[in-house]
Structures are given as C-alpha cells and as structure tokens.
Amino acid sequence: MSADDTIVRFMGHGITTAGVAVGALNGFQGEERKNVLKGLSVLHATVAVMVGDATRSKELKQPVGVANVVLHSALAVACGVRGFAKDA
C-alpha cells in the first residue's frame, strides 16, 4: 500500500468519524445521547488501535502516528466518561 492510499484511508475515516459524531450528538438527548457517546468511545478506541498499527508497520511516520494515537485515546476516554457518567 502506498503512502497516498494510507493518507486517503485515514482522512476518509477521520471525516466520517467527525460527521457521525456531530450528527449523532446533535440528534439525541438524555439516555440516547449517552449511548451515542459510548459508541463513539469504542469508535475512537478502534481508531487509536488502527493508527497504532499503521505507525508500528511504518505506514505512518512516528510523530504523526503517535499524536493520532494520543488524540483518539483521549477522545475515547472523554466519550466513555461522559457516556457512562451518572446523572445528578
């Protein structure tokens, strides 16, 4: 796989992820929104794994890959915390 294929794949995934997140969070409230956040947590965790694997196999350059793994891991945690939080 060439570097161009890798860039297209990751950009497409990023755009799709952002679109799904914004659309889902704007369309739901309450418990439904929490379920969306739980799903987004899993989605971001899988992106972190996918990017980590691409970085390990040298499809992505180290600084870019590591930064993306950190970003998506943080997003996974943030969405998970909000999704599983108890309402006061």
Image: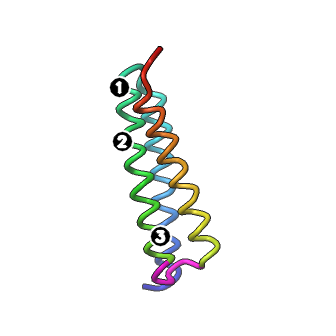
Q: Tell me if residue 71 is in the magenta stretch.
A: no
Q: Nearer the viewer, residue 51 or 22?
A: 51
User: In the rendered image of this protein, does residue 54 appear above or below residue 13?
Assistant: below
| Viewport quadrant of the N terminus | bottom left
User: In the rendered image of this protein, does residue 74 appear above or below residue 30?
Assistant: below
Q: Nearer the viewer, residue 27 or 84?
A: 84
Residues under numbered marks 2 and 3 in contact, where contact means CB atoms less than 8 Å apart: no
Q: Residues within 10 Å of mark 2 (few under 14, many from 20)?
A: some
Q: Which amino acid type is shown beneath numbered disc 1?
A: Glu
Q: Which residue is mark 2?
A: 39
Q: Residues within 10 Å of mark 3 (few under 14, many from 20)?
A: many
Measured as percent of width and height from the top left, residue 22 is found at: 50, 38
Q: Quadrant of residue 62?
A: bottom right
Measured as percent of width and height from the top left, residue 12 is found at: 47, 61
User: In the rendered image of this protein, does residue 83 appear above or below residue 42?
Assistant: above
Task: Name the residue at 51% across, 54% down.
Answer: 73
> Along the polypeptide, which appears first: circle 1 or circle 2?
1
